[in-house]
Amino acid sequence: MAARVFDGKKLAEKIKEKIAKEIKEKNLKPKLSLILVGNDPASQVYVKKKHEACQEIGIISDQHFFTEKASEKEITELIEILNKDPEVSGILVQLPLPEQISVKKVINLILPEKDVDGFHPVNIGKASIGQNCFFPATPLGILRLIEEEKIELQGKNVVIVGTSNIVGKPLGLMLLNKNATITYCNKFTKDLKEFTKKADILISAVGKPKLITKDMVKKNAIVIDVGTTRNETGKLTGDVDFEEVKKTALFITPVPGGVGPLTVACLMENTLKAEKQSFKKRLSKTSEINSDCTGEKND
């Protein structure tokens, strides 16, 4: 029996509909500032999708475009302005950045409470110990998928291929907090098959077409493909040999149409969360001002 193929678009729409409803009912005005440096085609597509998602559900999309030759100072000065702007709920800098701009410096400069991408060390640290924070959008999307499908994590062997700071590392820590047993693999792992074959849940986030083949997958495993690469014909493809692996897996995500749409939806979820937290602070501040004016104090 072939694996059940997960529909990421359907769940993404469900998440976005919930966000749109809350924005409307609570009369919120979330605003996401998107920063794109250079003309990388993939980055342009990703920013366009995020902008369209914002428009679709009622989030204000504030876009800032810079040329490939933009200086680090230009970017950091803009971030400092956006950090101070009370109307900006979240800030997102599309990666990768040109070599003259330090990714570390840029990410660290964004206020943790406006870091809707979940890349700031404060958010990564909180995510690792299960505290309230902004989880990186792709790992959060995978968690939403797991929750939607009622996939049990406790005691399961989860193998993650790919240890980037954006997906692999934070995802592993987030699943560890759900009591899964985590194994990380990367390009230095010897005999990758030895590890993947033992996985109850196999997640690949490398960006190498057909890295995961049928013989590397345990029968009835859950396979989540996060990799995205353009093949020689320009078609978007994942890390998993989809047509072959689906013959042995229990559940599999496609590329495109699997994790990708959830990444965008969860970014919207984080932006709404940022606005709600900011809204609470603004209400609290207004209450304090009113209290000062009347001579009353809030205990």
Image: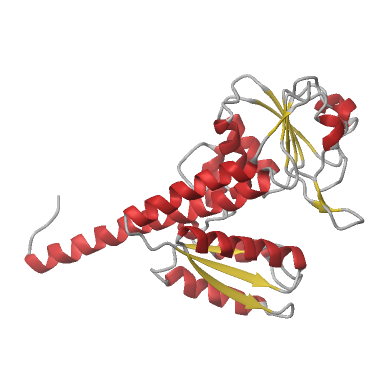
Among the 4 quarters of the image, the one containing residue 151: top right
Above or below 75: residue 113: above
Q: Is residue 4 left or right of residue 17?
A: right
Among the 4 quarters of the image, the one containing residue 255: top right
Is residue 10 or residue 275 the one in the foreground?
A: 10
Q: Residue at x 7, y 64 (%)?
A: 295
Colour scheme in the image?
Answer: secondary structure
Whether residue 118 is visible: no
Q: Is residue 93 left or right of residue 225?
A: left
Above or below 110: residue 39: below
x then y, percent, for residue 77: 55, 77
Q: Residue at x 61, y 79 (%)?
A: 74
x then y, percent, for residue 9: 62, 45
Most distant residue in the left direction = 295
x then y, percent, for residue 242: 82, 37
Is residue 17 or residue 154 the one in the foreground?
A: 17
Locate the N terminus and report the quarter of the image it occupies. top right
Q: Is residue 23 left or right of residue 229?
A: left
Q: Residue at x 38, y 51 (%)?
A: 22
Is residue 99 or residue 202 the one in the foreground?
A: 202
Q: How many marks?
A: 0
Whether residue 23 is visible: yes
x then y, percent, for residue 97: 71, 67
Above or below 195: residue 78: below
